[in-house]
Image: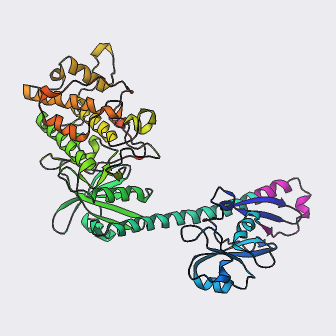
């Protein structure tokens, strides 16, 4: 982008600056300096010299060394800077792979590389061409007309620069993904072409679902295996794609969904997963969406809670690299033909070393209602694997109370924060009265799930158990469990429709 200053109406000239030069930068480094092209019927250069910037240079001679910029090229800066009349310019072009030409004020003689920053910051003169404007200048509309003209010209230059920047960013994103896939080596799943995806999905005929990241389609591989193909939206960058491949390609666990392949062609990105016949968990825990013959019994709900806990424990401790999911919720727990739970959707995941206890996040990520307090407010503590523990606890509470989470008759209130309501039922030993519990075994499973989940949603991260401890508590004796303190943090009541993602909506792969 360019900045226009010093407009001279008499000489019909403008002083133009490259915005990258005037913005904050490392001394001597202007990575976004680009060639400038002008409309010859409108503009012409004034008294300028061409400053040639070169990078990716090798075998610099002593003569060329005096033109060094001091920035260091290759990574985004320039190695050499030379004006058009430098006698060594042709030699420099022979040993440097990348060059661009930037106009600067007319300069006589040689210019050292350390002077090029000063030349660029001066800008350069640009003349505009026009006929005899004396009639217009005597008109009351002359000033307004010229302002409109300059605005149109500036808009044209800005739009051209913005278009080039967007193309550059798309190319950078493409190269970033390709570099990542190469770094995966043999760990990367099988790569498919986009035409292969059309055959696998029968031209995307059967849509299973749609979410913030894209659409999911049912497909079949050549060996007859059913798959779910998630086609990412074009508006999404490569970060979600890289997160999914980087995370799942490192895993192998019965409670983690399997990534069977992927497709990456330009802006078209897709991921191929094993097909889950029963879809996602949220279909079975909400009263308004659960059909009578599809409601899960307490034994099934309990085993789903245990299986999900084992999957999270594996992500936190079972891999060489610790994986933090950051979006645990019923929509992202898939169920196979035996209702075995599998954690899916790693678009918001973050990888870190197993020794790293606290991770840094630029933005809050996750889904409202399941996000740990420390993720959106650092006053509660550092972000860590305990943030996943909180999300897991909220999900299990929803599994227990999803069908009756709002009780109009409780304390005469029309609404009540449902973790508080569940906790009250636990204290009063009235879980069975509102949740269809018919036996002592079911009551014990429900109490375990509530006690463990309330421990998981403690406000202070250090008060929450690890996922290893969660598994032990669920599989241990009910008599060994202590009743946790009531969490002090409260929030407004939450409905299914309000569970929208903060960083970006996450979608379960059906």
Image point 73% across, 72% down: which residue? Answer: 103
Q: Position of residue 497 (x, y in %)?
A: 35, 36
User: In the image, is residue 464 above or below residue 32?
Assistant: above
| Magenta-highlighted residues | 124-149
Task: Choose top left, top right, bottom left or bottom right for residue 374.
Answer: top left
Q: From the viewer's perspective, is 327 left or right of 84?
A: left
Task: Choose top left, top right, bottom left or bottom right for residue 420.
Answer: top left
Q: Position of residue 257 (x, y in %)?
A: 23, 53
Q: From the viewer's perspective, is 317 left or right of 381?
A: left
Image point 37% across, 40% down: which residue? Answer: 367
Q: Residue furthest front?
A: 62
What is the number of callouts on the image? 0
User: In the image, is residue 38 above or below residue 260?
Assistant: below
Q: Position of residue 178 (x, y in %)?
A: 40, 68
Nearest the viewer among 408 and 443 is 443
Instruction: Look at the image and say whether residue 132 sits in the magenta stretch.
Output: yes
Instruction: Look at the image and say whether residue 233 sits in the magenta stretch.
Output: no
Chosen colour scheme: rainbow
Q: Does any portion of residue 166 appear in the rendered image?
A: yes
Q: Does any portion of residue 377 appear in the rendered image?
A: no
Nearest the viewer among 434 and 442 is 442
Which quadrant does the N terminus fall into? bottom right
Q: Position of residue 265 (x, y in %)?
A: 38, 69
Q: From the viewer's perspective, is 439 left or right of 157?
A: left
Q: From the viewer's perspective, is 22 left or right of 436?
A: right
Image point 64% across, 83% down: which residue? Answer: 92
User: In the image, is residue 136 above or below residue 481?
Assistant: below
């Amino acid at each position: 982008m360019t900045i226009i200053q010093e407009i001279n109406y008499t000489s019909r000239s403008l002083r133009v600056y490259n915005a990258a030069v005037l913005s904050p930068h490392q001394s001597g480094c202007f990575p976004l300096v680009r060639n400038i092209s002008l409309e010859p019927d409108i503009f012409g250069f004034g008294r300028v010299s061409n400053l040639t910037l070169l990078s990716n240079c090798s075998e610099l001679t002593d003569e060329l060394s005096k033109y060094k910029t001091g920035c260091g090229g290759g990574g985004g800066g320039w190695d050499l800077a030379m004006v058009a009349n430098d006698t060594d310019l042709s030699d420099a072009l022979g040993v440097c792979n990348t060059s661009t030409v930037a106009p600067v004020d007319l300069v006589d003689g040689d210019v050292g590389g350390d002077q090029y920053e000063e030349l660029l910051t001066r800008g350069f003169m640009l003349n505009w061409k026009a006929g005899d404007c004396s009639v217009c200048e005597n008109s009351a509309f002359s000033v307004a007309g010229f302002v409109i003209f300059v605005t149109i010209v500036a808009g044209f230059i800005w739009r051209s620069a913005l278009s080039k920047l967007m193309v550059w960013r798309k190319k950078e994103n493409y190269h970033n993904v390709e570099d990542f896939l190469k770094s995966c080596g043999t760990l990367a799943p099988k790569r498919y072409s986009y035409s292969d995806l059309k055959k696998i999905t029968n031209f995307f005929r059967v849509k299973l679902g749609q979410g913030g990241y894209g659409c999911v389609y049912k497909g079949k591989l050549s060996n007859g295996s059913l798959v779910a193909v998630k086609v990412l939206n074009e508006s999404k960058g490569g970060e979600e794609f890289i997160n999914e491949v980087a995370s799942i390609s490192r895993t192998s666990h019965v409670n983690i969904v399997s990534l069977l392949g992927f497709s990456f062609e330009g802006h078209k990105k897709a991921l191929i997963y094993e097909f889950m016949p029963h879809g996602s968990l949220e279909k079975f825990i909400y009263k308004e969406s659960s059909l009578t013959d599809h409601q899960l019994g307490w034994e099934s709900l309990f085993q789903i809670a245990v299986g999900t806990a084992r999957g999270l424990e594996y992500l936190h401790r079972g891999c060489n690299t610790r994986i933090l999911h950051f979006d645990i919720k019923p929509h992202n727990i898939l169920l196979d033909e035996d209702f075995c739970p599998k954690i899916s959707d790693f678009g918001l995941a973050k990888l870190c070393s197993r020794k790293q206890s606290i991770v840094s996040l630029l933005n809050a990520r996750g889904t409202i209602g399941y996000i740990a307090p420390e993720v959106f407010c650092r006053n509660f503590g550092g972000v860590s694997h305990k943030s996943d523990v909180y999300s897991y606890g909220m999900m299990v509470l929803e599994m227990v109370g999803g069908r009756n989470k709002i009780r109009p008759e409780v304390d005469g209130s029309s609404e009540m924060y449902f973790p508080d309501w569940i906790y009250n039922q636990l204290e009063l030993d009235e879980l069975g009265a509102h949740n269809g519990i018919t036996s002592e075994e079911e009551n014990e499973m429900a109490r375990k799930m509530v006690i463990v989940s309330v421990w998981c949603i403690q406000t202070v991260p250090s008060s929450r158990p690890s996922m290893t401890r969660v598994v032990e508590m669920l599989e241990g004796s009910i008599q060994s469990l202590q009743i946790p303190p009531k969490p002090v943090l409260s929030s407004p009541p939450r409905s299914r429709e309000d569970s929208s993602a903060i960083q970006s909506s996450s979608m379960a792969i059906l």
